[in-house]
Image (cartoon, rainbow, N blue to C red):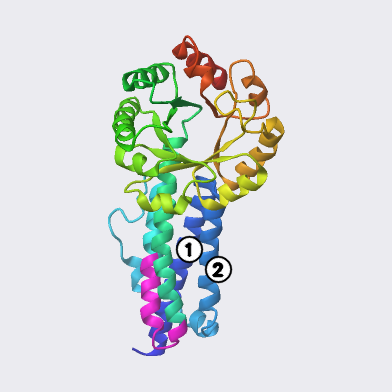
């Protein structure tokens, strides 16, 4: 194969890959509103362009024959049929990996170092596609969450009572339920978590297990919530067989920045007010939430305000733009958990 043909192949696949990276970037930017993922797609595109820049750019341009390209007339049924923006991303990712494979092979006889970078980029596209699809799956589940209720289970609490409270909160309009069980044995916790998860799935309510990623995975829960001292997010994801929503608690701007960098799916910000559930935590107050909200918006990160929230103070959070809140004692320790859930949910939806 002469160099003129090789350069035609390289030029065509370079353009194909570059265009695909742009589509992937726009999906992450506008579809997921995720600055870090959009930045990754942009970085892949820039590396592609910089590396191809090591070849003879004049030869690439002059090898192009748009009018004489027989591929222009080749059509495949459904070739440009896309049902959603997600389909556009998936098609672009496949197109990018195919183009990079063609580039790696065709550049071998011209520049082995450039060819090696193309091969490396191809594997990075595979990993990036997985990361974005997993993010989209968890984002879709989380997007409807407004009222998040934390249910505590102890050795003194009968499993039936915990599950009955779960049913009551679901009936009251909770969108997400977290099971906290610090002192149960692993066997007890797994049994309870399995039943808890079934109830949530039947009602299309997001189920979260506190601290225990292993229990979340084994019970089929939608996610796990981690504190500052729990295992790292990337290690937690490595245990999961399916997309797992991972949340992290934050109590300061430093912890917030670290959580965003960790790649978790949502952060808990607070305590907004004194919390009966965790009285030892220093109250960060509404000022921290005010500072956190624009940071989270810019990063495309979901959140839940937490700490001492009830029907008497939730308005002050809604006034600063809070959309999602987590409550525990305001519902679970009340005489009528279902009615309190309904009250809080209605206030959130106003």
| Quadrant for the C terminus in the image | top right
Secondary-structure class at tag 1? helix
The residue stretch that appears in magenta: 97-113
| Quadrant for the N terminus in the image | bottom left
* Residue at position x 53%, y 71% in the image: 47
Rendering coords of residue 106 (x, y %): 38, 81
**Crowd band around label 2 with a 10 angstrom C-alpha radius: few (<14), some (14–19), many (20+):** some
Q: Locate residue 36: give its quadrant.
A: bottom right
Q: Is residue 217 left or right of residue 295?
A: left
Give the labeled residue for mark 2. 46
* Residue at position x 47%, y 69% in the image: 15
Residue 122, above or below 139: below
Rendering coords of residue 166 (x, y %): 38, 21
**Crowd band around label 1 with a 10 angstrom C-alpha radius: few (<14), some (14–19), many (20+):** some
| Closer to the camera in the image, 182 or 36 | 182
* Residue at position x 66%, y 42% in the image: 252
- Residue 105 lies within the magenta run: yes
Q: Earlier in the sequence, mark 1 or mark 2?
A: 1
Rendering coords of residue 23 (x, y %): 48, 56
- Residue 73 lies within the magenta run: no
Give the labeled residue for mark 1. 19
């Amino acid at each position: 194969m002469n160099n003129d043909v090789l350069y035609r192949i390289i030029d065509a696949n370079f353009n194909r890959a570059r265009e695909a990276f742009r589509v992937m970037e726009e999906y992450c930017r506008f579809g997921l509103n995720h600055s870090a993922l959009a930045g990754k797609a942009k970085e892949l595109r820039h590396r592609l362009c910089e590396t191809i820049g090591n070849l003879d750019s004049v030869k690439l341009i002059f090898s192009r024959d748009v009018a004489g390209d027989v591929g222009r007339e080749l059509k495949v049924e459904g070739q440009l049929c896309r049902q959603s923006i997600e389909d556009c991303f998936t098609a672009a990712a496949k197109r990018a990996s195919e183009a990079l494979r063609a580039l790696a092979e065709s550049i071998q006889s011209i520049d082995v170092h450039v060819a090696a970078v193309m091969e490396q980029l191809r594997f990075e596209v595979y990993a990036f596609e997985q990361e974005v699809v997993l993010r989209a799956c968890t984002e879709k589940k989380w997007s409807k969450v407004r009222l998040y209720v934390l249910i505590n289970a102890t050795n003194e609490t009968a499993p039936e009572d915990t599950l009955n409270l779960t049913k009551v909160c679901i009936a009251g309009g909770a969108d997400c339920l977290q099971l906290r069980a610090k002192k149960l044995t692993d066997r007890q916790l797994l049994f309870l978590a399995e039943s808890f998860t079934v109830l949530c799935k039947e009602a299309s309510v997001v189920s979260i297990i506190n601290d225990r990623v292993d229990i979340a995975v084994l019970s089929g829960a939608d996610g796990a919530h981690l504190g500052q001292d729990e295992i790292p997010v990337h290690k937690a994801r490595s245990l999961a067989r399916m997309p797992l929503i991972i949340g992290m608690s934050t109590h300061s701007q430093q912890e917030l920045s670290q959580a965003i960098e960790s790649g978790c799916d949502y952060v808990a910000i607070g305590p907004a007010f004194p919390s009966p559930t965790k009285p030892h935590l220093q109250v960060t107050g509404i000022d921290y939430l005010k500072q956190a909200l624009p940071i989270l918006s810019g990063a495309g990160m979901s959140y839940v305000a937490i700490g001492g929230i009830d029907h008497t103070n939730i308005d002050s959070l809604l006034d600063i733009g809070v959309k999602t809140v987590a409550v525990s004692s305001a519902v679970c320790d009340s005489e009528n958990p279902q009615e309190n859930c309904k009250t809080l949910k209605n206030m959130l939806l106003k």
